[in-house]
Image (spheres, rainbow, N blue to C red):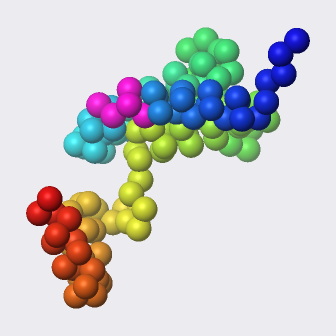
Amino acid sequence: MTKVTLSIVAQAIGSASRISMANTLAHHTAYIKADTDVRGEMRAEYLTGYIMGVAKLSEAKAQVVLETPRAERDDAGQAAYYAATASFSYHIIRPVKGVAKGSGDIVEAAMRLVAKMTPAQKRKLTRLMAE
């Protein structure tokens, strides 16, 4: 019998994560460019599909999990919901560190960060941008 070590499990998960990040890049790009209504539709589609996969539920039952208020969900439904929202954030939203949620345009956020830089940091950034 082969022993499955933690390292082997971590490598498999890491490999799957790398592949899934590459496969969701187009969806991330679409999400960034989408308006609020389309983003909501994308979120609902992703969460439904994720819950179907992680909890082995039909689409109708996965939608029931989503429509059930948090206080009324069973533990398994709540765990599936939390996992789905975390996965959606990681794979589709891909939040930028240092940019507050709801801060608006990412370029404006970058400009605010540049304004806080020291002259040495600005020179370094300029060199990096020229490469």
Q: Where 5 falls versus 88 (above or below)?
A: above
Q: Quadrant of residue 35?
A: top left
Q: Is residue 101 left or right of residue 17?
A: left
Q: How many marks?
A: 0
Q: Nearer the viewer, residue 117 or 129?
A: 129
Q: Position of residue 118 (x, y in %)?
A: 28, 87
Magenta-span inclusion, residue 22:
yes
Which SS does the magenta portion mostly show?
Answer: helix
Q: Position of residue 83 (x, y in %)?
A: 63, 37
Q: Is residue 92 left or right of residue 130?
A: right
Residue that appears at 64% across and 41% down: 82
Q: Is residue 42 left or right of residue 126?
A: right
Which residues lie in the magenta part? 21-26
Q: Where 33 falls versus 49 (above or below)?
A: below
Task: Quarter of the image for the N terminus: give it.
Answer: top right
Residue 56 visible from this viewpoint: yes
Task: Quarter of the image for the C terminus: give it.
Answer: bottom left
Q: Nearer the viewer, residue 121 or 78?
A: 121
Residue that appears at 60% across and 19% down: 53
Q: Position of residue 104 (x, y in %)?
A: 28, 62
Q: Is residue 40 left or right of residue 83?
A: left
Q: Position of residue 116 (x, y in %)?
A: 29, 84
Residue that appears at 38% across and 26% down: 23
Residue 68 visible from this viewpoint: no
Q: Residue furthest bottom?
A: 119
